[in-house]
Amino acid sequence: MALLEISGIIKQDRNATLLSPVHLQVEPSQCVMIRTRGDLGTLFLQIVLGLNRASEGEVFFQGERLHPDMKKWHQIGRFLLTDQLYSRLTVSEYLHFFRGLYTNGREIYSLMQLMGLESLQHKIIRKLNNSEKRRVHLARCLVNDPILLVLEDPEYKVDLETRHIIRKMFDQLLKEGKALLVTTSLVEDALAITDDVYLLDEQQFKKLNIENETDTQDSDEENVDIHFPVGSFVKIPAKVKDKILLFDPLEINYVESIEGKVYLHVKSDKFLCDLRLNELEGQLKTFGFFRCHRSYIVNLQRVREIIKWTRNSYSLILDDPNRSEVPLSKGNMEELKRLIGI
Amino acid sequence: MMSISWRRIQVIIRKELKDALRNYQVLMMVVVPIGMALLYQNMQSLEGNQLILIFPILMSFGMTGTIVQSMIIAEEKEKHTLRALMLSPATAIEVMIGKSFLSFFLTLLTIFLTMLVTGLSMGISLLFWCITLLCILFFITVGTIVGLMSKSLTETAYLGMPIMFLMGLSPIFAPLINKAWLTKIVSFLPTAHYLQATELLMKGKTFIVGSHWLNITIWLILAVIICLFVFKRNRIED
C-alpha cells in the first residue's frame, strides 16, 4: 500500500478540463517532483490536500480516502505559497506555538538548526526577508514530524542559501523515511533532487522519461569519434517552424532532453533539435561539452559555478543571461573533476 | 467531534496574547476608551453628571470587545493562517475559545482601567460586575459573528463600526436627539438596559432582577445562536 495514492483525479470547470487524469503513488523515502505551471500546481495540490474538490477520482492516504474530518491530517505537513505567517511573533515563538498544539514532534532548537534559523530565532517574523520566511514556513511543516510533506514550489524566488538548506532538508527527510510531494516550475531543479519527475499540464500528466538515452552510450561514443575528428566542420541543426537554423557548437549553452525531445539552449532561447542526445554528445565532445546528467549536455566553457547541494546532489550554474542551472549527477562528478583538472 | 483540550487552548491564548501586545491596532482599541476616560475626568462641567462616566465603558464594549474580536478572527481568515491551524489537532472551537478569552481579558482590563481613571464607584460592585460580564460576553459574541462574516480586516470595519455605534453608543446620543421612535428602538438595546441598571446602582439602589437581566440575557442567547449558525456555514466554506 502506497503512502499516498492519487487515483485518476480530474478537474473540470464547465466544459474546460483544468486537470487531466492524474495517477500517482508516493512511497516512504520517495521524493516525487512535479514540474508544472504555477496555477495548475496550486489547483493540483489543493485537490490532493482536500481544499478543493476533484470532479472525478480519489486521493488515499495510507489506504484511507482523504476527507476534511480525517484524523490523519496531522501526519501530513503542508506548505502552499499562499500560506502566511503570524508576522508579529518571533521565529521561536511561532514554532513553539505550533509545536505546542501537538503532543509529539520535533525538538524546536534542532529544527531551527536544520532550517538555518537559529541565529534568527528572536527576530520578529515581519522583519525577515522572503527567503528566511520560506524557511520558517518549511520548519512549521516539520514541527509535528509528519510522514508526508506536500510542498508547493518551495524554491520559488528564494536565495541560494535557502535552496541549499531546502535540499539538505529533503535529504534528511528522505533518510528518515519520509515522503515528499513537491511541485516546481523548473525541470532542471527537479532533476537535481530526484529521478521521480513528472510533467503536468492541462493535456497530460506523465513521468519524465530519463532512462532511454543511456543504453547505447558506449558504442555511440566510439562511432562518433571516427566521424567527427577534432577540428572538422560541425554545425548543429535546429528546427524553427519550417526553417532550419545552424548553430556553432560554442554558441550552445547546454542541451536538454525532455520527454525524448532534445532542446538546444542558445542565449536565452531554446530550439528543438532532431538529433538524439547521444549523437549530440559525440559531436559536441570535442568542443568541450560534457554529459553531466542523463538528460543534459553542458558547454563546460559556460560553467561559472559548481554547487554542491547535498552529498549526492550537484548543479552547474552557467554564465548565460539566465544564469541557467543544469543538474549534475553524482556519478559524473569524478569525470568532471578529471576534465577540469581538479 | 474531537474533545476540547485545555492544554491546547492555553497554548493558543499564550500566542494570542504575545500577538496582541505587538498589534498596534489592538492596542489602539485599549488606549482609546482609557483616553476618553481621562478626557471626561478632566471635564469640570460634567460634575454631578456621573452617568457620562459610563461612556468609556460602553466604548470598550464595542471597541475592545467587538472590534478586537472581529479583527483577530478576520486577520486569520484573510491570511489563511487558520488553515495551517486546522491541519493540527487544534479544533476550530479551541481556536475560537482562545481568541474569545483574549478579547474577554482585554475588555475586562480596559473597563477596569477606565473606572480607575474616572474614579467611578458602584453601590454594589458584585451586581455591577455580573451585569458587565454579561454585556462583555454579548459584545464578544457579536465580534465573533462579524469576524466570521468578513473576509478581510477592512471588511470588519464596515460591519463592525455600525454595530459598535448602534449597540454601544446610541443610548448616549438618543436622548440628545429626543425623537420618540428612536427612543423606542434604543430602549430595546442591551446597552440601554445596562445604562439604566448602572444608573440605579450608582444611586445606591439595587435594581429589580427582572427586565434588565432578562433583556441582556435574551440578546446574548440570540447572538450565540446566530454565531453558531454563522460558524457552521463559514467553516464549510473555508
Image (tube, grey):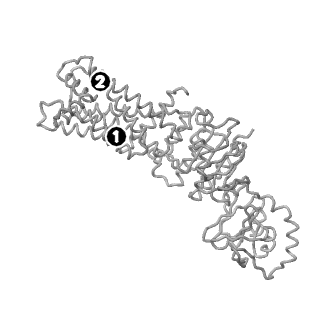
Disc 2 residue type (three-letter): Asn
- Find disc 1 in the rendering and name its residue: B160
Residue ID at (31%, 25%): B216
Q: Position of residue B202 (x, y in %)?
A: 19, 24
Res B152 → quadrant: top left
- SS class of the residue under badge 2? helix
- Disc 2: which chain? B
- SS class of the residue under badge 1? helix
- Find disc 2 in the rendering and name its residue: B215
Res B219 → quadrant: top left
Q: CA distance from mark 1 to mark 2?
A: 22 Å
Nearer to the camera, A126 or B184:
B184
Q: Is residue A193 visible?
A: no
- Disc 1: which chain? B
Nearer to the camera, A214 or A123:
A214
Residue ID at (80%, 58%): A211
Mark 2 surroundings: few (<14), some (14-19) or many (≥20) residues within 10 A: some
